[in-house]
Image (cartoon, rainbow, N blue to C red):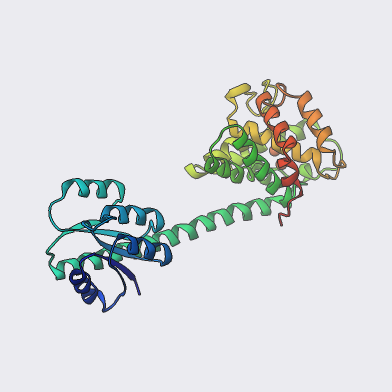
Amino acid sequence: MHTLLLVDDDPDVLATLTRSFRKGYKTLSASGGAEGIAFLNEHPVDLIICDQRMPNISGDQVLSHALHARPEAIRILLTGYADVESLLTCVNEAHIYKYVTKPWDPAELNLTVVRALESLVLKRDLDTARDQLETAYKDAVVMLCLAAEGKDQDTASHLYRVQHYTEALAIAMGVDAAEAAHMGFMSMLHDIGKLATPDAILKKPDKLTAEEWDIMREHPLAGVRILGNNPFYECAREISAGHHENYDGSGYPHGLCGDDIPMSARIVKLTDVFDALTTNRPYKTPWTMETAITHIEAHASIMFDPAMVEALKKLFADGTLLRIMTADYV
Ligand SMILES: [Fe+2]
Ligand SMILES: [Fe+2]
């Protein structure tokens, strides 16, 4: 059952309103602005009908408070006369759904409330559906990465650490939080192209021949093909294509240099190597973070973007890297 908050300093009006909505709704009646605000702070409310002209706290103030305290709740203003100025304030600052002039037609107000609550339910259903969809595609990305993981020496925890290093480094480079989180998530797909690399090459214990290296170097663009053309995976395609490019242009597949390499790929180049250096791999024992950072510094402007190397050093100094490295991921 929906909860309606009715606010009016006139007891007769308040009683009329309460009577007309008693059936089918849970009603809260407030006899003034202060009481209305107190209700808003204490109770979840689906819809507010509030009088404009009240002593001390006016209707637009109550509805503006509602916008912040209960942003989802529908806001309806009751005006005694055409008070254009307060109406404008209300529309602009409290984002009201509708204003109703006194005296109102009860059937019309009832219909307004019914329609408003229908739109509220619809919005909630849409939000739920969007959340479910978002979870589903995120799960699909992780599933795809985990399926690919068995083919290489990379582990699930490598992918999660690269995700979080990438997000932290992106924020340190000035990327806004939501975009950095997306970039981190997309970084999990950096080696998805290895699905197309034959096992005989991926798992070969001996050194690769020149021809085998050529095939190995196809994985960045194989990843781009696997990731298709959905705009959502644009960042993942950039990362897949560019995570073996070197800052000085000596990398592959395109030999891009400097800022021609997309920022996301420059970041993942660094976080992927940093994680490989500092963790156990079949061919090596983990290096300490200090040794890894010294090694990375020696390759600044050669393999890595020097500004990103500096940002990584700051993340080392403030403990961010250690926190990510030692977190539990699986
Ligand atoms: Fe790779
Ligand atoms: Fe990797």
Residue nearest the viewer, comparing 158 with 3 = 3
Instruction: Residue lying at the far front in this picture: please name it.
Output: 56
What is the quadrant of residue 203 in the picture? Answer: top right
Q: Quadrant of the C terminus?
A: bottom right
- In this view, 1 is above or below 112: below
Toward which corner of the image does residue 28 lie, by quadrant? bottom left
Asked whether residue 201 appears in the rendered view, the answer is yes
Count every numbered label the image shows and give the total.
Answer: 0
Can residue 230 be seen here? The reply is: no
Q: Position of residue 188 (x, y in %)?
A: 64, 45
Q: Answer with left or right where residue 116 lies relative to residue 311.
A: left
- State the residue at coordinates (76%, 26%): 297
Image x and y of residue 113, in percent: 24, 66
Considering only vertical position in the picture, is 161 above or below 52?
above
Which quadrant of the picture is home to ligand 2? top right
Left or right side of 41 for 162? right
Q: Residue furthest bottom?
A: 23
Q: Nearer the viewer, residue 182 or 237?
A: 182
Q: Quadrant of the N terminus?
A: bottom left
Q: Viewer-proximal residue, 312 or 150? A: 312
Residue at the image position 33 percent from the left and 52 percent from the top:
64
Residue 285 percent coordinates (x, y) = 88, 42
Q: Position of residue 78 (x, y in %)?
A: 20, 60
The structure residue drawn at horizontal position 82% and vertical position 34%, both measured from the top left corner, is 290
Specify whether 190 is left or right of 74: right
